[in-house]
Image (tube, rainbow, N blue to C red):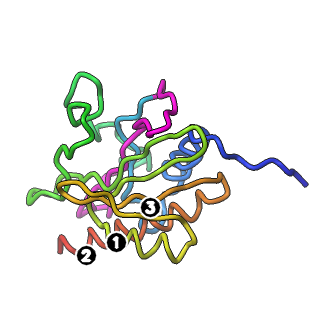
């Protein structure tokens, strides 16, 4: 039996991204990892590693995946020079599903030396409830608009983090109907 636990924030972020991109069932089929900073270095305050977007389902297939099941790569272009999508100040850059069915940024992933945190701008209540139910640490962030932070402190908690993302995604999907 292996005694090592994964507590490196960057590695936890990689595991979560792999889980999100590798699963195409249930609510996770609507989620994409976008605007990834492959050279991100963990910081004490948390450095943005990537965003998680929720794609609206296409009428024909139920998702925006191509016919062969692969992502077409057209999701989430950078809208700033630093690739953060927000001018680098941590502020919102357009969350919330639009009337024309565009993708919505569900969460942002930030890496610390010893953990990952997800910052939810939409689906906040569902994310907080699911995180508490999963035994993950959660707290509100005083910002305008408000945010919910969910902390993933071990690699073994990645599956629970996907449950949180699924709950938030369902909440956003229900709100847009």
Q: Secondary structure at mark 1?
A: helix
- Decide which of tag 3 and tag 1 comes sooner along the chain: 3
Q: Specify whether residue 63 is painted magenta.
A: yes
Q: Specify whether residue 37 is painted magenta.
A: no
Which residue does the numbered mark 1 point to in the structure image? 170
Question: Residue 26 appears at what percent x and percent y?
Answer: 45, 68
Quadrant for the N terminus in the image: bottom right
Disc 3 from disc 1: Cα separation:
10 Å
Give the answer, above or below, for where 160 lies relative to 44.
below
Give the magenta part as a residue range.
38-65
Q: Secondary structure at mark 2?
A: helix
Q: Nearer the viewer, residue 48 or 66?
A: 48
Decide: marks 1, 2 in contact (CB < 8 A)?
yes
Please give the name of the residue rendered at 29% of the width and 33% of the height, measured from the top-left corner: 84
Which residue does the numbered mark 3 point to in the structure image? 28
- Decide which of tag 2 and tag 3 comes sooner along the chain: 3
Decide: marks 2, 3 in contact (CB < 8 A)?
no
Give the answer, above or below, for where 58 lies relative to 9.
below
Quadrant for the C terminus in the image: bottom left
Which residue does the numbered mark 2 point to in the structure image? 174
- Image position of 136 (left or right of 5): left
Decide: marks 3, 1 in contact (CB < 8 A)?
no
């Amino acid at each position: 039996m292996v005694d090592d636990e994964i507590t490196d924030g960057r590695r936890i972020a990689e595991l979560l991204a792999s889980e999100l991109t590798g699963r195409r069932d249930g609510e996770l089929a609507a989620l994409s990892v976008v605007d990834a900073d492959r050279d991100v270095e963990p910081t004490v305050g948390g450095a943005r590693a990537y965003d998680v977007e929720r794609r609206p389902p296409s009428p024909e297939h139920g998702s925006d995946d191509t016919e062969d099941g692969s992502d077409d790569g057209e999701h989430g272009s950078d809208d700033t020079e630093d690739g953060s999508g927000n001018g680098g100040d941590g502020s919102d850059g357009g969350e919330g599903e639009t009337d024309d069915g565009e993708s919505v940024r569900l969460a942002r992933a930030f890496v610390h030396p010893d953990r990952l945190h997800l910052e939810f701008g939409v689906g906040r209540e569902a994310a907080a409830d699911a995180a508490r139910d999963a035994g993950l640490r959660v707290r509100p962030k005083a910002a305008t608009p408000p945010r919910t932070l969910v902390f993933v402190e071990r690699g073994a908690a990645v599956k629970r983090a996907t449950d949180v993302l699924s709950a938030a995604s369902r909440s956003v999907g229900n709100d847009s109907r």
